[in-house]
Amino acid sequence: MNNFMQMYSQFMGNPMQMLMQKYNIPKDIDANNPNSIIQHLLNSGQVSQAQVNALQGMRNNPMIQQLINNKQ
């Protein structure tokens, strides 16, 4: 759980840095537009639509929402 919270904190501090460590994201992509990043990852085959759907479903999970709200 501590590792997850540390990763979450790092992600919130600099989301593009964390994403660029794992995924091939062009530097010229609009970092302020999450949809453009998601679309690039889908178009390049780095993530599947099922993975995106699963993450979006997690966002609506009450336990995840509570965890995020407690850290803000």
Image (cartoon, rainbow, N blue to C red):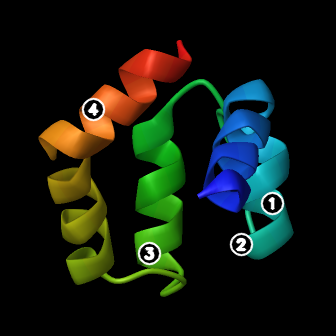
* Cβ atoms under marks 2 and 1 closer than 8 Å: yes
Circles 1 and 3, Cβ within 8 Å, touching? The answer is no
Which tag, 1 or 4, sits closer to the chain's start? 1
Q: CA distance from mark 3 to mark 4?
A: 29 Å
Nearer mark to the viewer, of 2 and 3: 2
Q: Amino acid at mark 1?
A: Met
Circle 2: element type: loop
Q: Is residue 45 left or right of residue 23?
A: left
Q: In terms of depth relative to the viewer, which is nearer, 31 or 5?
A: 5
The residue to which callout 4 is attached is: 65
Mark sitting earlier along the chain (2/3): 2
Question: Tag 3: Cα neighbours inside 10 Å, few (<14), some, or many (≥20)?
Answer: few
Q: Residues within 10 Å of mark 4 (few under 14, many from 20)?
A: few
Q: Quadrant of the N terminus?
A: bottom right
Q: In the image, residue 28 lies at what x, y percent?
A: 80, 43
Dot 3: element: helix
Under circle 1, the secondary element is helix
Amino acid, disc 4: Gln
Look at the picture and state if 38 lies above or below 35. Answer: below
List the residue tagged with mark 2: 23
Distance between mark 2 and mark 1 Cα atoms = 5 Å
Q: Horizontal placement of 20 versus 29: left or right?
A: right
Q: Amino acid at mark 3?
A: Asn
Marks 2 and 3, how far apart in space? Answer: 13 Å
Mark 2 or mark 4, which is nearer the start of the sequence? 2
* Amino acid found under the numbered disc labelled 2: Tyr
Residue 43 marker:
3
Q: CA distance from mark 4 to mark 2?
A: 25 Å
Could you say which quadrant of the image residue 57 lies in? bottom left
Q: Does residue 59 lie above or below 51 as drawn? A: above
The local secondary structure at tag 4 comes to: helix
